[in-house]
Image (cartoon, helix red, strand yellow):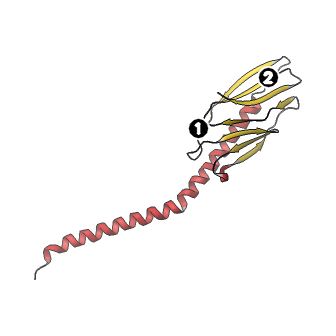
């Protein structure tokens, strides 16, 4: 019996099978370990930058001067962090980033003058972020609104 004609076919089939098994194994290994951890770490970094950017714009949106003001400052923000929407919450002088993945939640204290009253409120990432400041110089009110 002469089976020499089958040897190249069997060899190529075995080589292709090993390559497919290797790729499948590496994909399963990466998608269950380092890739989700890396996505969470990258999402955390982006969350920190989003919070710092929003806090900086909020703090710098207060106009100088001794007259009554009514200002609107639009702040460009990303729509998603780690492929999910998020919210910014303004509570008692603190800015909180609330994300569906709890590991990405962040918080910072705002540095605002004593003559500024902060109105608690929320903003969703599906809207444009607008910082509003109104009032006389000795009692200004600041809040977030979506547009």
Instruction: Assess disc 2: are there few (<14), some (14-19) or many (≥20) residues with their C-alpha within 10 Å of its C-alpha.
Output: some
When asked about the image quadrant of residue 142, the answer is top right
Q: For residue 90, which numbered disc appears in the image?
A: none
The residue where tag 2 is placed is 134
Is any part of residue 63 visible from this angle? no
Give the image location of residue 39, x and y in percent.
Answer: 56, 53
Question: Which residue is rendered at x = 73% and y = 39% of the image?
Answer: 89
Question: Which residue is rendered at x = 40% and y = 64% of the image?
Answer: 24
Q: Is residue 60 found left or right of 80 in the rendered image? A: right
Give the image location of residue 15, x and y in percent.
Answer: 29, 69
Question: Which residue is rendered at x = 75% and y = 28% of the image?
Answer: 61
Question: Which residue is rendered at x = 66% and y = 50% of the image?
Answer: 104
Helix, strand or loop for disc 2: strand
Give the distance between the C-alpha atoms of the residues marked 1 and 2, in whole angstroms: 27 Å
When asked about the image quadrant of residue 9, the answer is bottom left
Give the image location of residue 88, x and y in percent.
Answer: 70, 39
């Amino acid at each position: 019996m002469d089976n020499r004609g089958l040897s190249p076919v069997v060899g190529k089939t075995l080589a292709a099978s090993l390559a497919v098994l290797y790729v499948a194994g590496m994909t399963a290994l990466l998608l269950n370990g380092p890739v989700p951890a890396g996505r969470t770490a990258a999402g955390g970094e982006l969350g920190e930058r989003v919070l710092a950017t929003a806090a900086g714009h909020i703090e710098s949106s207060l106009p100088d001067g001794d007259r009554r003001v009514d200002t609107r400052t639009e702040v460009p923000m990303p729509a998603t962090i780690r492929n999910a929407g998020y919210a910014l919450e303004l509570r008692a002088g603190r800015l909180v980033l609330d994300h569906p993945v709890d590991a990405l939640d962040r918080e910072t204290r705002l540095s605002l003058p004593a003559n500024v009253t902060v109105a608690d409120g929320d903003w969703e990432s599906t809207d444009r972020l607008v910082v509003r400041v109104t009032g006389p110089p000795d009692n200004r009110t600041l809040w977030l609104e979506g547009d």
